[in-house]
Image: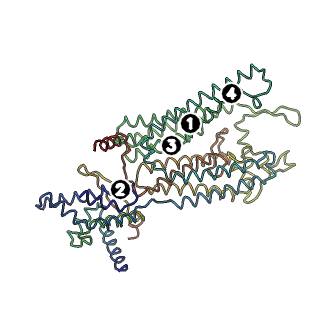
Amino acid sequence: MAEELSHENENNESVVLKLLSEKDMYGYEMIKTLRKRAQNVFEKKAGMLYPLLHGLESNGTLNSYEQYCRGKMRKYYSIAKEEKQEE
Amino acid sequence: MEEYIKKLLEQVRFEKAHKAIGEEIRAHIENQIEANVLDGMDKETAEKKAVEDMGDPVETGIALDKVHRPQMAWGVVIVALFVAIVGTLIHVLMAKDPALEYLKYRNDIGSFIMFTVSGISVMLLLYLLDYITVAKYSKVVATCMIAVYMLGIFLRDKVYFMQLEWLDKTGHRTGWENADFPLPIKVLDLTSSFMNPPMLLLIPLYAGIIYKYKGQKYDGLIKSVLWLIIPSYIVSYRHNYVICLIFVLSMLVQLTFAIKKEWLKVSKIPVLITLWTTFSVFLGFVAKKEYERASGTVLRWGGEDGNLYERPTINANIDIVRAYMKQVKLFGNALLSSLGGKSYSPAQYSISDPGTRMILTYILTTGGLIVGIVVIATVVGLIVYGLVTVLKTKNQLGMVIGIGCMMWLISNTVVNILVGTGIIDDQGGGAFLPFVSNDKLVESYALLGILLSIYKYKNAYSQHIDINLRIDLKKLRLKKLK
């Protein structure tokens, strides 16, 4: 069971990193894009995207910045430079 | 939606992180609601469906709780303890140095250890501090500090004249040191000695002050510059110009970052060029003035041949240090030739302030070049590590506070290295080697403590945070009304 969970986490992580390697995105934008591509690994559990993003940010894999868009603050995520170089 | 967010946040124990998490989740659900409405759902169904899509709030909350915990910059603490041990070792060796017997240096080792231990305690205590709360009151705290400081200066002068007057009346029978002044003078003297707040704290407060002007244009810039100039001018009343310049430089670097991060809506490049050119001109002007003043002061001494010798003091100190530097070995004690090379004595015999201002000269001449480089590298390593640590924080205010604190330590280190190696003469300025000189130890560790506090909240606070007191008051009023 634990192994399955960790495998799932790794899979979700690689999906998110692949997505962010294309361009910087905010949480909802990621879910929307995954849905369009029919690979929404967060179906019916979109909230679980955030612990994953925050964890990747905390360990330095991702960076984040905020930007106002139509009067609302959006938190964008991007891949940290070192990670990009490794790819 | 609110019920979902509430349930989710109940699982996250670190309350400081609630605001940022709540806002991000709320924005997501609102976006989903908008999309659902566009798909033809009514608002109620759209919200219900958007919340369902988010999944279990408890599961998500527990997962977020694992990520959001107060962070401790253990690396900085460990390196700081290592530097404290290095500093103590140097001072223990100095206490054993027979060449420093004439300075009764042994008396100072106790104070070094006491201040280092107090400094580390203050550093760990400051970890508990929430820098955002302090930043909210930055203007109030800074104004009170400046007022107390000015009152202290006024009282100090007043007491001095009262003491002089009393000594005149009593005919200077006892002399200053043994004088038994009347009780009111004693009380005033004691009061004024307590009215010397650590003005260095104006540096972290300054970041909070500029942040309060966030979003303003040139009016915000003018106010920020005034908050830089006025306190620096007041500080210059009691301190040497080098201390004052380091103070201005640390705040100017903070202002530069604030402008770079667009806190103030001004044309970045012209403003930064103007600010730094003005600072450079001011630096040149002060240096020239101080050089002329120092050159005008002449040191006189009687030679063994009975003649009177003299030379400007500015050259006296720097010449001696440069002479030491020529004798520095890779390892071991440098001997300084005197009496035309007929006799040699350890250089440290003639170093003034070996435990504080000239500690690097002492280390280089007694331990050698390699030991000196290792000590410098240790101190610089800690400061750079601290700077790198603070740059990891998302919150811009925290980052600028940390940059100001580290800038103060870096500037003191650079000036101290230049003075200690005889490259410049600061005329007894008082720049010190942080954590190694027996000077400003508690203050230096306190700044590291502020850094720990910033790192603690590195994931909790978002990039920008409102520190406007009026918003807090509004919330308080709303709570009362409810």
Q: Are marks 1 and 4 on the same chain?
A: yes
Marks 2/3: CA distance? 29 Å
How far apart are the two marked residues, 1 and 4, measured between alpha carbons?
Answer: 47 Å
Answer above or below: position of B45 versus B210. Answer: below
Indicate how the structure is coloured in the image. rainbow
Q: What separation in Å lies between label 4 and label 3 (alpha carbons)?
A: 37 Å
Looking at the rendered image, the disc whose residue lies closer to the viewer, 4 or 2, is 4
Q: Nearer the viewer, residue B137 or B403?
A: B137
Q: Earlier in the sequence, mark 1 or mark 4?
A: 4
Instruction: Rate crowding at label 3 as few (under 14), some (14 to 19) or many (20 or more) other CA atoms within 10 Å.
Output: many
Q: Which residue is mark 3?
A: B203
The reply to whether callout 2 and callout 3 are in contact (CB within 8 Å) is: no
Viewer-nearest residue: B92 or B367: B92
Helix, strand or loop status at disc 2: helix
Q: Which mark is residue B183?
A: 4
- Quadrant the N terminus of chain B occupies: bottom left
Q: Which residue is mark 2?
A: B18
The quadrant in which residue A42 appears is bottom left
Query: Type of residue at label 2?
Result: His
- The chain holding disc 1 is B
Host chain of mark 4: B
Q: Residues within 10 Å of mark 2 (few under 14, many from 20)?
A: some
Left or right of residue A73: residue B462: right
**Do callouts 3 and 1 mark residues in contact (Cβ within 8 Å)?**
no
**B294 or B391, which lies in front?**
B391
The residue singled out by tag 1 in the image is: B284
Classify mark 1: helix, strand or loop. helix
Same chain check for tags 4 and 3:
yes
Q: As shown in the figure, which amino acid type bears the numbered disc 4?
A: Leu
Q: Are marks 2 and 3 on the same chain?
A: yes
In whole angstroms, how far apart are the C-alphas of marks 3 and 1? 23 Å
